Image (spheres, rainbow, N blue to C red):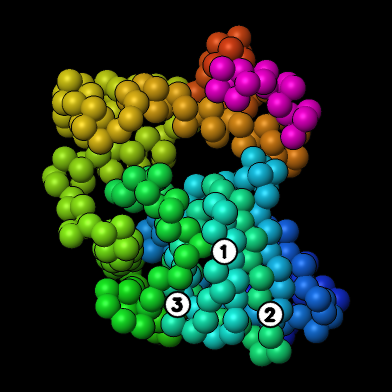
Amino acid sequence: MLTVFDTATIAARDRLEAWREVTATSLAPTVIDSPAPEAFTAHLRAMPLGNAQVTSMAYTSLTSRRSPRDIRRSDPECYQVALIRAGRQGIEQNGASVVLRRGDLVLYDSSRPFEAIVSGTSPAESVILQFPKRLFPLPVDQVAGLCATSLPGTEGIGSLVAAFLASLADGHTRCTERDAQRLEIIAVDLTTAVLAHHLERENPPLRSPTHTLYLRIIAFIEENLHHPELRPATIAAAHRISSRYLHRIFQQHHPVSVAAHVRTRRLDRARRDLADRRLDHLTIATIARRWGFSRPADFSRAFQRHTGAPPRDYRSNT
């Protein structure tokens, strides 16, 4: 794994703020505080797995809160599965709360507010698997019920996930890009198996050829949202299938049509840009064009239907 951050190289007074910045970049932005800022220590190592990432961390006492405002400003739309390796850690999300100890697994969602607390005199340690929710086959409403609950990682199927994450965190083997992509599939499949088990399903959802194609299409759309010519016909052509077959796949695996999904994802990207103060120098029209909307008036109407506010009002009130 690559060492991304270590407080040993940073002055004590700057460590907590540096930790806020590195976790915001590596995971998701949160408001982090410590009962003893100048005694705070931490380190973080990360390993990319295709669209996913495994992060090994150690840190002293802190609180970490992710608010609705943080989510509006920046949301990677990921699930995070943490393996607790040391220390006493608590988390609250979706009205559930749990105190976690060594060997426990816990799931949380970057798109929902949460609060995490680490207490004790010795450093806490965890390994976090983060991956885009679009890659996960289980229904969002069912997964939400497992957030902030203790999932055993020392026995049963949970021990497979725990061993996998621990081996990645402790390993020193360099992976090729293709190796990382294969490991991403394994990581998501193992997580699916564990959560399906806890949802009392006999078998995890199996990936049929059409579901695998659907996931590739979803990933293709995410990578090409900025192209104005991204339409159902071009998406179908890129995957060497007919437009009719593309629509059929979406009917089987997605709650809305292809065009509606593309429009929604573009509006979500534009919404994030409008909430990002670092992009205040860009006009609303520029941001609209950036995400495939060539006509500002069309963008403004679509954005207001999507968010309930015109782009200008949304930007000024965020």
For marks 1 and 3 on the same chain, the one whose residue lies earlier in the sequence? 1
* Dot 1 amino acid type: Ser
Instruction: From the image, state whether disc 2 or disc 1 is nearer to you.
Output: 1
For residue 262, the mark is none
x and y percentages locating residue 3 in the rendered image = 56, 77
x and y percentages locating residue 204 in the rendered image = 21, 57
Task: Name the outermost residue toward the bottom.
Answer: 122
Task: Name the outermost residue toward the left.
Answer: 209
**Magenta run includes residue 58:** no
Let me know if residue 35 appears in the view. yes
Q: Is the magenta stretch mostly helix, strand or loop?
A: helix
* Dot 2 amino acid type: Ser
Q: Which residue is drawn at 67% across and 18% down?
A: 310
> Disc 2 versus disc 1: distance between alpha carbons?
15 Å
Depth check, front residue: 112 or 77: 112
Residue designated by label 3 = 104
Image side of residue 48 versus residue 284, left or right: left
Where residue 195 sits, quadrant-wise, is: bottom left
Picture quarter with the C terminus: top right
Q: Which residue is drawn at 53% across and 27% down?
A: 267
Q: Do the residues labelled 2 and 3 touch (CB within 8 Å)?
A: no
Q: Residue at x 64, y 35 (%)?
A: 273
Q: Is residue 60 placed above or below 112 in the rendered structure?
A: below
Residue range corresponding to the magenta coloring: 303-318
Depth check, front residue: 18 or 257: 257
Residue designated by label 2 = 119
Q: Is residue 250 placed above or below 179 in the rendered structure?
A: above
Q: Which residue is drawn at 45% across and 70% down?
A: 150
